[in-house]
Image: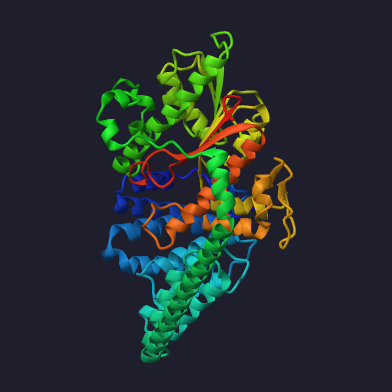
């Protein structure tokens, strides 16, 4: 027997007429037809009715009850003047099913009838409560949704009749029967209102308790704020100690091995059109920053323009040096890879500007959506011959290439990209960010951690990454100090906007110098610089340049 109810098809013209009138919203005519159909059905036998068995051999009680439900629906829609007739029909329908067992009327129909009787306000409250109890007293009767609705109806009936205790009991039973329902907050508020009306809640005491709890939370917030401030001060002191300790060696490394001699073009220089590296007016609109940046457009577009101009100036210098050293041509093109390319916001601009040089580009990103968007932008800019896309993470890229780009790759992803470059002897240009996320690599189960009090490095088993990156810094910092440095050096705001930020910027440059020291140990010539002022290019404007085989 089905758990839901559908009225069986009957060969009864008045019933069919009534359904048609109901659909056309001619409710009085529909009521007359259903009344006539009910009279005919009460006199006919099951065999004479020729009932369809779509819902499985319905009984006489089910047929008559279901037909009477249609009559009640038509009367309810006809207006208040039919209230007395509705009450009479509801009483008759209740008598028909009140003593029926499952062999006479299936539970699905009983639940439906009881729900409708409880909803019709023309019915007496006593009968409505009986209908609710008929379902609720049997825990196996009705779905969870149906039982919740009937609990709500019972509570509202009790409340309208002034029986607040019973109304509250119905809501309490509802909450107990389905405690995790998403609508329980509304019922809890209704239950609270009932308790207030019953005088069970001391409002003054509740208000005082709320004030006490609020004061307690405020005290906890103030304590946490002081704790964070103290910890930050302690961390900055520790950072200052580390930088002071390493100052002689850092200065030696920066002066003798790492050039610190490039900076983005100033405002004065840009007034001269000859120094502007990119003519944005000639660029296809599909690959310009204006087309790709949606939020905070004014500020972010200006920053992106300055960043791309400075990056392109560096990239062009590296390309010119490589082309001068080797005989690149259309058959042997210079291979440039952009790791973490997104949808091509940076590299598609470079590819367009270098379209007449023997260069080809591969853009790598882990997000399929970005790759799809990037391919579409590549096609619209007419760069399909020189630009290829690869969907995957940085670790999965195994091809040879000549220049690697890593623009704002977060945390350890920059280290993976630089490792790829060093592994194939490719030059690189990187703008690191989010140094604090390196801690996730250090804390990952795939990282072999050294002793906290020793100088053994942490090695990522998948990527063979060692932290600290260079032998130089591994001889100076413990793993614990290095982990603290990554957090302290994670500076994402401009210098001067936050207390201790200038010190944190020095820590960041130390970690960048560590990355470049690794490249120097592999025979690279390196430079540590900035794309421009942080006001123009944003806080993430530090850039690492590594040249393989060109200068040492």
Position in image of residue 180 (x %, y %) = 55, 67
Position in image of residue 261 (x %, y %) = 45, 37
State which quadrant residue 80 falls in.
Answer: bottom left
Image-based side of 416 in relation to 543, left or right: right
Numbered disc total = 0
Image-based side of 166 in relation to 439, left or right: left
Instruction: Between residue 173 and residue 103, name the one nearer to us.
Output: 173
Q: Residue at x 42, y 55 (%)?
A: 70
Position in image of residue 66 (x %, y %) = 49, 56
Instruction: Between residue 331 and residue 37, name the one nearer to us.
Output: 331
Q: Residue at x 56, y 40 (%)?
A: 256
Instruction: Between residue 271 and residue 108, name the one nearer to us.
Output: 271
Q: Is residue 366 visible?
A: yes
Residue ranking furthest to the left: 271
Q: Residue at x 46, y 83 (%)?
A: 166
Instruction: Between residue 173 and residue 414, name the one nearer to us.
Output: 414
Position in image of residue 6 (x %, y %) = 53, 50
| Quadrant of the snapshot with the C terminus | top right
Q: Is residue 2 visible?
A: no
State which quadrant residue 217 falls in.
Answer: bottom left
Colour scheme of the rendered structure: rainbow
């Amino acid at each position: 027997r089905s758990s839901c109810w559908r009225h069986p098809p009957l060969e009864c013209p008045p019933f069919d007429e009534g359904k048609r009138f109901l659909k056309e919203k001619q409710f009085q005519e529909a009521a007359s037809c259903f009344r006539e159909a009910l009279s005919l059905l009460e006199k006919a036998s099951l065999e004479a009715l020729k009932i369809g068995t779509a819902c499985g051999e319905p009984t006489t009680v089910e047929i008559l009850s279901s037909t009477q439900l249609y009559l009640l629906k038509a009367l309810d829609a006809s207006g208040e003047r039919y209230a007395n007739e509705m009450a009479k029909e509801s009483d008759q329908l209740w008598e028909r099913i009140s003593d029926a067992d499952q062999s006479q009327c299936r539970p699905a129909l009983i639940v439906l009838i009881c729900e409708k009787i409880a909803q019709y306000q023309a019915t007496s409250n006593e009968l409505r409560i009986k209908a609710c109890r008929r379902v609720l007293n049997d825990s196996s009767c009705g779905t969870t949704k149906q039982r919740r609705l009937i609990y709500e109806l019972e509570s509202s009936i009790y409340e309208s009749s002034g029986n607040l205790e019973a109304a509250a009991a119905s809501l309490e039973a509802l909450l107990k029967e389905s405690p995790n329902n998403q609508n329980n907050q509304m019922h809890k508020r209704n239950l609270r209102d009932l308790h207030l009306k019953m005088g069970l809640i001391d409002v003054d005491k509740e208000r005082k308790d709320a004030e006490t709890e609020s004061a307690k939370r405020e005290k906890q917030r103030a304590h946490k704020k002081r704790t964070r401030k103290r910890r930050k001060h302690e961390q900055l002191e520790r950072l200052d100690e580390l930088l002071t300790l390493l100052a002689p060696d850092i200065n030696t490394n920066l002066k003798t091995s790492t050039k610190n001699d490039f900076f983005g073009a100033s405002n004065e220089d840009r007034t001269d059109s000859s120094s502007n590296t990119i003519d944005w007016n000639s660029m296809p609109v599909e690959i310009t920053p204006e087309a790709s940046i949606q939020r905070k457009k004014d500020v972010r577009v200006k920053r992106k323009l300055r960043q791309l101009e400075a990056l392109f100036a560096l990239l062009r210098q590296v390309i010119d040096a490589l082309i001068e050293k080797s005989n690149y041509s259309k058959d042997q093109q210079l291979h440039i890879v952009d790791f973490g390319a997104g949808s091509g916001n940076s590299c598609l601009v470079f590819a367009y500007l270098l379209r007449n040089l023997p260069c080809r580009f591969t853009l790598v990103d882990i997000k399929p959506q970005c790759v799809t968007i990037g391919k579409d932008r590549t096609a619209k800019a007419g760069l399909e011959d020189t630009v290829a896309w690869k969907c995957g993470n940085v670790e999965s890229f195994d091809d040879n290439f000549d220049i690697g780009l890593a623009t704002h790759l977060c945390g350890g992803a920059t280290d993976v990209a630089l490792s790829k470059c060093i592994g194939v002897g490719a030059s690189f240009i990187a703008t690191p960010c989010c140094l604090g996320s390196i801690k996730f690599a250090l804390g990952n189960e795939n990282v072999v951690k050294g002793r906290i009090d020793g100088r053994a490095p942490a090695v990522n088993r998948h990527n063979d990454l060692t932290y600290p990156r260079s032998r130089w810094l591994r001889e100076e910092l413990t793993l614990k100090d290095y982990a603290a440095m990554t957090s302290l050096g994670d500076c994402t705001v401009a210098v001067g906007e936050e207390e201790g930020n200038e010190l944190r910027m020095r820590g960041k440059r130390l970690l960048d110098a560590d990355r470049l020291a690794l490249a120097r140990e592999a025979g690279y010539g390196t430079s540590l610089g900035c794309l421009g002022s942080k006001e123009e290019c944003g806080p993430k404007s530090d850039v690492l340049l590594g040249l393989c085989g060109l200068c040492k």
